Image (cartoon, rainbow, N blue to C red):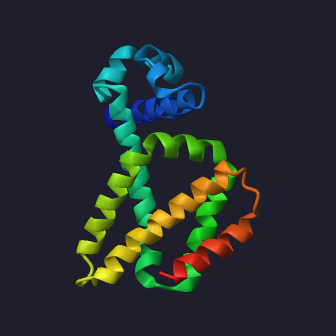
Amino acid sequence: MAQRENYSVKREMEKALLRLLSQKPLTDISVTDLVREAKVARVSFYRHFSSIADILESLSEQAAELFVSETIPPIHSQDAQKWRAFVSFYFHQISRNPADFLQTSSILDESLNSRSQSKVGEALEHQPDPTMWELYSWFGKLGLLRTVAQIWVMNGMQEDLEEMVDYVTSMLHSF
């Protein structure tokens, strides 16, 4: 029971930080703001984290694991239908909440990119000797996907979802 309670409190603090980040810059968020937003005791914060940066690290680790677990299968398969399905899902998720995507990607970008690269590298270690072309094209595809999505959102998502899926899928096939 205690394990479940701890997980819940930890998740509430992570969610609270994301909510606060949509309201003000990271540098203006205090532990007091965070525990008030999460509706938890200050001691609960320190039981799980030593700083707000620890929460960011936890969030970036989770995001990297999810991103990599969703991208490795289509990347490895080279299957056009799997790529299209993944790109469609990715852009659909972004279109549902573009502000959160920009907020979290700008704050977590460096950490998320580093962790994603590390996790992709770990996943590729289990592949039978990828060639130089395969190795670098996988990282290039991931970078292309994230960068195009960020620019699409920053430009106000003027193109419709299907246009973006078509464009990105065709770009990914050129790798």
Rendered location of residue 31, percent (x, y):
41, 18
Rendered location of residue 60, percent (x, y):
39, 46
Residue at the image position 35 percent from the left and 21 percent from the top = 44
Residue at the image position 44 percent from the left and 57 percent from the top = 66
Rendered location of residue 98, percent (x, y):
65, 48
- Considering only vertical position in the picture, is 80 above or below 56? below
- Considering only vertical position in the picture, is 60 above or below 140? above
> Seen in the image, is 47 located left or right of residue 164?
left
Residue at the image position 35 percent from the left and 81 percent from the top = 134
Q: Nearer the viewer, residue 36 or 171?
A: 171
Give the quadrant of the N terminus.
Answer: top left
> Seen in the image, is 158 located left or right of residue 127?
right
Total numbered badges shown on the rendered structure: 0
Rendered location of residue 157, percent (x, y):
72, 55
Residue 1 appearing in the image? no
> Seen in the image, is 117 located left or right of residue 24?
left
Q: Nearer the viewer, residue 1 or 152?
A: 152
Residue at the image position 61 percent from the left and 55 percent from the top = 151
Residue 13 appearing in the image? yes
